[in-house]
Image (spheres, rainbow, N blue to C red):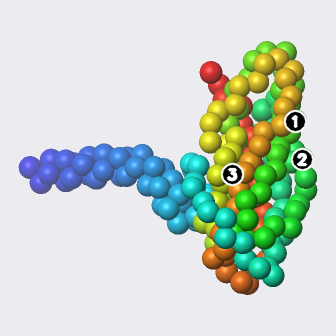
Amino acid sequence: MRDTRLTVKLAVLAVAMFGFGFALVPIYDVFCDLTGFGGRTASGAQTVVEQPVAGRSVRLEFLASVDRRAPFEFSPTTGSMEVQPGRIYETAYFAKNLRDSRVVSQSVPSVAPGTAAEYLKKIECFCFTEQAFDPNESREMGVTFMVDPELPANIDTLTLSYALFALEK
């Protein structure tokens, strides 16, 4: 009788741990989206109003990486730019499908330092949706953004990085 109760308790504990493991990924994603932890930025278009901060500029660097299994060339069209917080800017990333077949991609953004992620507001971005590429197609994909005027004064350089992944469809 005693062994049966212990067995049932251990089985319930194992099922609870298994369920908790499944719940961790969505909970972590929500936590990162809300706090900007891990350099994550908001996942959708944002409404912003230009309010330039006079006399302040921030260096914004652009990086790109490609999953090693993804058949793409991928790079920013410019390496960096000086931006004025509160002003809207545009830039682009170049991508080329290296396959002779159609490929769908998804880009995942991150911002460094991670504490500044909440201050980089993406208004329009290719990262909001999957991007389908025809065989050997290349294109520039735009990003419209603004650095929030509330960016802490001790941050003078931001890095916007995208990782490009091929989706299996």
Q: For the C terminus, which image quadrant?
A: top right
Q: Which residue is mark 1?
A: 73
Q: Which residue is mark 3?
A: 109
Q: Report x, y in % for residue 50.
A: 67, 65
Q: Given the image, on which type of amino acid does mark 3 rest?
A: Pro
Q: Are marks 2 and 3 in contact (CB under 8 Å)?
A: no
SS for tag 3?
A: strand
Whole-angstrom CA distance, mark 2 to mark 1, is: 12 Å
Q: Residue at x 26, y 46 (%)?
A: 11
Q: Report x, y in % for residue 29.
A: 51, 53
Q: Report x, y in % for residue 159.
A: 78, 63
Q: Can residue 9 be seen from the camera position used here?
A: yes
Mark on residue 146?
none
In the displayed structure image, the side of residue 71 where residue 166 appears, left or right:
left
- Badge 2 crowding class, 10 Å Cα cut-off, few under 14, some 14 to 19, many 20 or more, is some
Whole-angstrom CA distance, mark 2 to mark 3, is: 16 Å
